[in-house]
C-alpha cells in the first residue's frame, strides 16, 4: 500500500457491515486487507488494523502519523487474556467510533486477524458471544468490521462456525 490512495477496481470492492473472511496465511491477509482499508479511506472512515504482531512499516507513514490508520496488536485491542468480554468490547468500539466522528471521520473500518482469539474452547465461546454483539453494533452504527480467521491455524469446523456468525462471508 503506498501513500497515494487509488480508487479500487470495481471487482475489488468490499461489502460493508459485519464481514467474515477465512484466509490462508498472514501474507494473504495483509495483502488483501490493504484494499479493504483503502476503501475505508476513500469513504472518509477511520481505519483500524489489528493483528497479533503488527508491522506499522507496512503501511503509509502519513496515514499512521495523521491518525487515519490506527494499528494495534491483538492483545492491545482485546486484552492480554485474549478472552473477549462482549459488553466491554462493544463499549470500546463505541468509544472509538465517537472519537472518530468527533474528529470528522464518517465511521470506523476495522480489519482484524482474530484467529488467536478462537484457538481454544474458552476463547472461542467468548468470541462467539462477541460476534453476536458485534452484529448488533454494526447494524446500529457506521462501522464496517472485517473479522478474519487464518485457515492455516484453525480447523475446518471452527472456520465454518465462525463464518456462520457473519451475514456476509467474503471469499477471494
Image (spheres, rainbow, N blue to C red):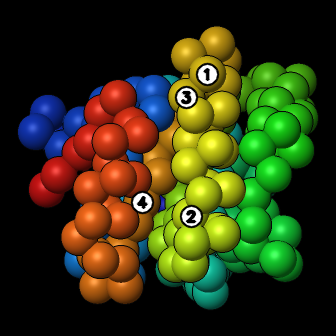
Mark 3 crowd level (few <14, some 14–19, many ≥20, 10 Å Cα): some
In this rendering, the label closer to the viewer, 2 or 1: 2
Q: What whole-number distance in Å separates the C-alpha atoms at marks 3 and 2?
A: 16 Å
* Quarter occupied by residue 168: top left
Q: Quadrant of the N terminus?
A: bottom left
Which residue is depicted at the point 64% across and 68% down?
A: 123
| Corner quadrant of residue 10 | top left
Residue at 66% of width from left, 18% of height from top?
A: 141
Q: What is the spatial separation of the Cα atoms under label 1 and label 4, in whole angstroms?
A: 18 Å
The reply to whether the C-beta atoms of the residues labelled 1 and 3 are less than 8 Å apart is yes
Q: Residue at x 56, y 42 (%)?
A: 131
Hey, which quadrant is residue 169 in on the image?
top left
Q: Nearer the viewer, mark 2 or mark 4?
A: 2
Q: Which residue is mark 3?
A: 135
Whole-number angstrom distance, CA of label 2 to CA of label 1: 19 Å
Task: Please tell me which of labels 3 and 4 falls first in the chain.
Answer: 3
Q: Residues within 10 Å of mark 1 (few under 14, many from 20)?
A: few
Q: Secondary structure at mark 1?
A: helix
Reading the image, the residue beneath label 2 is 124
Q: CA distance from mark 2 to mark 4?
A: 14 Å
Element carrying mark 4: strand
Can you identify the residue that label 4 sits on?
148
Amino acid at each position: 500500500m503506498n501513500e497515494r490512495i487509488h480508487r479500487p477496481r470495481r471487482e475489488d470492492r468490499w461489502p460493508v457491515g459485519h464481514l467474515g473472511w477465512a484466509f490462508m496465511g498472514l501474507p494473504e491477509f495483509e495483502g488483501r486487507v490493504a484494499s479493504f482499508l483503502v476503501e475505508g479511506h476513500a469513504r472518509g472512515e477511520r481505519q483500524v488494523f489489528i493483528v497479533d504482531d503488527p508491522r506499522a512499516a507496512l503501511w503509509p507513514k502519513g496515514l499512521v502519523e495523521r491518525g487515519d490508520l490506527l494499528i494495534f496488536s491483538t492483545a492491545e485491542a482485546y486484552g492480554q487474556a485474549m478472552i473477549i468480554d462482549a459488553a466491554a468490547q462493544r463499549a470500546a468500539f463505541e468509544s472509538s467510533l465517537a472519537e472518530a466522528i468527533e474528529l470528522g471521520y464518517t465511521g470506523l473500518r476495522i480489519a482484524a486477524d482474530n484467529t488467536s482469539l478462537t484457538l481454544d474452547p474458552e476463547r472461542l465461546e467468548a468470541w462467539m458471544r462477541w460476534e453476536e454483539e458485534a452484529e448488533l453494533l454494526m447494524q446500529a452504527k457506521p462501522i464496517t468490521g472485517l473479522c478474519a480467521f487464518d485457515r492455516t491455524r484453525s480447523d475446518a469446523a471452527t472456520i465454518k462456525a465462525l463464518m456462520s456468525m457473519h451475514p456476509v462471508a467474503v471469499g477471494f
